[in-house]
Image: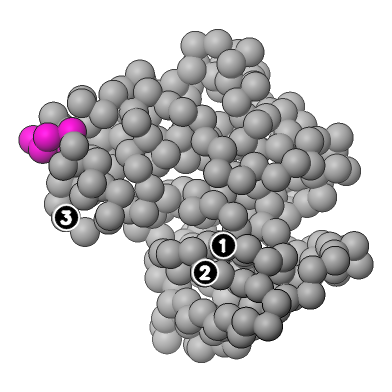
Amino acid sequence: MESSVRQAVAFIRSRYYEPITLNEVAAEVFVSPYHFSRIFSRAVGLTPGRYLTAVRLFAAKRMLLTTDLTVSDIVCSVGYNSVGTFTSRFTRAVGMSPTQYRSPAVARLTVAASHDFARMPDLGDMIEANRGRSRTQEATNTLRGTLEIPAEVCGANAVVGVFRDAAPQRAPVAFEAFTAHGRTEFEVTGVPNGSYRVIAVAMPHGAGAATGRVLTANTRRHVTISSGLNTYVSLSARPAEETVTPMAVTLADVSAVGADPRRDGDLCLQPTVA
């Protein structure tokens, strides 16, 4: 990744709670806004604005899950100056309000991955949640693939999710949870027809889990899944670097916490950076 992109990512992560603009980020790395937006999108897979949105939402979810801060305090901490605006946009993107996101059912099944914070549900809980989803699913497509983790990692609990968006905020449309050792084959069943990003998160057993070091992988591009089409993906998980797009999604049934079950599609928060 170009050094200017790494510098821009560091700038966004250190200033996401401020009303920063595309011009300010581009000026920080001494690149024209137009050229900067192109190289950033090519390297990261998201526009600078969508990356900022992902960072802000991840920070908000992290605080909702791990602190007793009020929603008002969290709003001020993630770059918004209106509780109403933040709550409305959070609900549209995530599918539930900030208060609903604090439900124990949501927290218990939240998968979070960033370079400095990781969270992986109990493997048995993830498998049970997937069984519950399987009992109500109508789609019959299956995604097959392999997940490879580094040789020095002595096993990991892993989840492979099929998402509509490159920076997902809601649960995957389908997922599979399993124990990974080296190169492990997997199958994700019940995937509807469509174009998706496939994202894997793996938490190493033992010391890796204790330190919160998380492994991530994604397809970088959308893959097409449809009836009669055999789709196969190869994912190679590596330690999450500072430049990885942070992600926090729950595998819980959002209807169980009174949330809006509508799909988010490609919704994003429309931050100051475009």
Q: Residue at x 12, y 34 (%)?
A: 32
The x, y position of residue 177, in whole percent, is 69, 72
The quadrant of the picture occupied by the C terminus is top left
Q: Tell which residue pokes out farthest to the front in this image.
A: 228
Alpha carbon distance from label 1 to label 3 = 27 Å
| Residue bearing mark 3 | 2
Query: Marks 3 and 2: in contact by CB < 8 Å?
Result: no
Q: Nearer the viewer, mark 1 or mark 3?
A: 1
**Residue toward you, 112 or 45:** 45
Decide which of tag 2 and tag 3 comes sooner along the chain: 3
* Left or right for 89, reference 258: left
Of circles 2 and 3, the one toward us is 2
> Quadrant location of the N terminus?
bottom left
**Label 1 secondary element:** strand
Q: Is residue 32 magenta?
A: yes
User: Majority secondary structure of the magenta segment?
Assistant: loop
Labelled disc at residue 196:
1
Amino acid under disc 1: Tyr
Residue found farthest to the left: 30
Segment colored magenta: 29-33
